[in-house]
Image: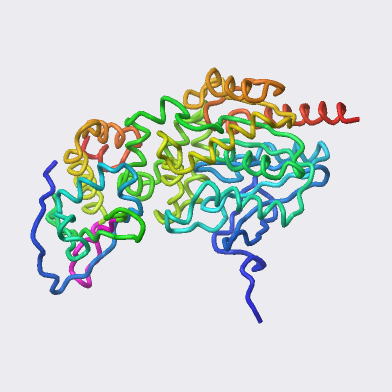
Amino acid sequence: MKQVEVIEKPSHEGKRKALVLAEDRVGHYPEFREFFIRCFSLDTNGLSKSGYIRGPSGMLYSLVFVGRSGESFPDGLEIYALVDALEPLSEEDVDTDLWAFLRWMIQGIAGEWKVEDLDATGRLYQLPFLSRQG
Amino acid sequence: MKLDAAKLPMPPGHFVHEEWPYEPRFKRVNGWRIHYIDEGSGDPVVLLHGNPAWGFLYRKFIKPLIAAGRRVIVPDMIGFGLSEKPVREQAHSLDGHIANLTSLLRQLDIRNATMVCHDWGGPTGLGFALSNPDRVRALVVMSTWAWPVPPAEFHKRIFPWRMMHAPLIGPYLLGRHNALAGRGMYLSVVDRRRFRDDAQSVYEGILPDPATRLLTWTWPRWIPLDDTARGLERFQWLERELKKSKFPTLLVWGREDEVFDHKTFATRFKELLPHAEGPELVTGRHFLQEDSGDEIAKKINAFLDRIGRRKV
């Protein structure tokens, strides 16, 4: 499976942002929050910039970090696919891109969090595209 | 004219099933629309489900309990079944869910109730019982817990438990792919073929879209794993108050339950409630109602008959 790549802010011209995944509690396990702070320099950027990644399908995604007063930043995270403004999403691409994103995230968090455990969890719950990949 | 959503005839998602011929009822609790059924007459038996189930889990209990002269109330927890499903994780808390149940049962002016508690129906139902002892007569406890960390070795493991509901993975796996109501429940029954043929699609179908499945990964995050956890004080309170309580109690456990295994969990309940009857073991994993619904209903009827005779 190809890797996720962190990229600079791409052009939004002719694109729309399609919400594909939302997390209300990034810091439920604090190492997840720390990973995003490290990866996207959130300790200096704060709310001023979104993060951007390219998925294995080539689709671009915007990572919008959410702050909530009284909680450590970022508290939430919304992932938007940047798609051609009037075109529908390929759900299959989104599914496999998000899975690659989750693997990349777990790899970056490291420590007791292991990609093999994520893969085993995906297999246990029979994610349809994992069985298609054999 | 003010529109009262709780009195609207039917919200979206009307449910029709041959094993669920019950009239849907609704109330407002803490600003949410809660669905429940209320059938039969007599002393009430309140059947409480957990994650990711809904009242349908108790379909085999309802007729035998009514036939024995009891009133049966089955609420769907806010976030599940035909109740309103908030779309923000911050809408859910253990105290909030206890307060939701309290609001419903006070509106119905429930007295002399038997609280049948399973999974998260445990901490919520026991929370109601312990804070409203004048309304409760007895407890039936199945595959749940009511004390602080750690509930089970399983809940501390990364694979599969913590990974399944981890940040972003929970919304992906349990949200986009409905993993808990589908495969998760399937893995937690004994007769998997029967479950797949008779019930799995009902549990999956009642949570049709990712946004409706929020509570399936939110509840696991409320299980305390260390002393910094949310809800820890409420679990400490539950344990403390339960130890003092004298409610007649029946423990029923699935013989094959490998998550809340009876040797650990039923034994712990017996330590807290030495007067409790049981554990009566039946065929079943965590969702023991699916494998042994008729048998458990008989056990509850027999238990309530016994304590009824004692009262006389």
User: Residue at point 63% right, 25% down?
Assistant: B272
Residue drawn at x 32%, y 31% as measured from the top left: B158
Is B309 left, or right, of B246 in this rendering? right
Against B267, residue B165 (above or below) is below
The residue sitting at the top extreme is B263
Query: Which quadrant, please, contains the N terminus of chain A?
Result: top left
* Residue interval drawn in magenta: A77-90
Relative side of B183 to B244, left or right: left
**Quick check: is A78 in the magenta stretch?**
yes
Residue B238 is left or right of residue A102, and the answer is right
In the image, residue B18 above or below residue B276: below
- Give residue B170's position: percent from left, percent from top: 35, 45
Q: Residue furthest right?
A: B312
Q: How many discs appear?
A: 0
- Image quadrant holding the C terminus of chain A, namely top left
Residue at image position (46%, 34%) is B186
Task: Please provide percent x and percent y for residue A31.
Answer: 25, 41
Residue B64 position by quadrant:
top right
> Residue B69: x percent and y percent?
83, 40
| Front residue of this view, candidates B250 and A57 | B250
Specify the quadrant of the image occupied by residue B237: top right
Residue B40, horizontal then vertical, whole percent: 79, 47
Residue furthest out toward the bottom: B1
Q: Is residue B217 above or below residue B286?
A: below
Whether B171 is drawn above or below B191: the answer is below
Examine the structure image and report whether residue B148 is included in the region drawn in magenta.
Answer: no
Between B18 and B86, which is closer to the camera in this rendering?
Answer: B86
Front residue (pair A35, A61): A35
Colour convention of the picture:
rainbow
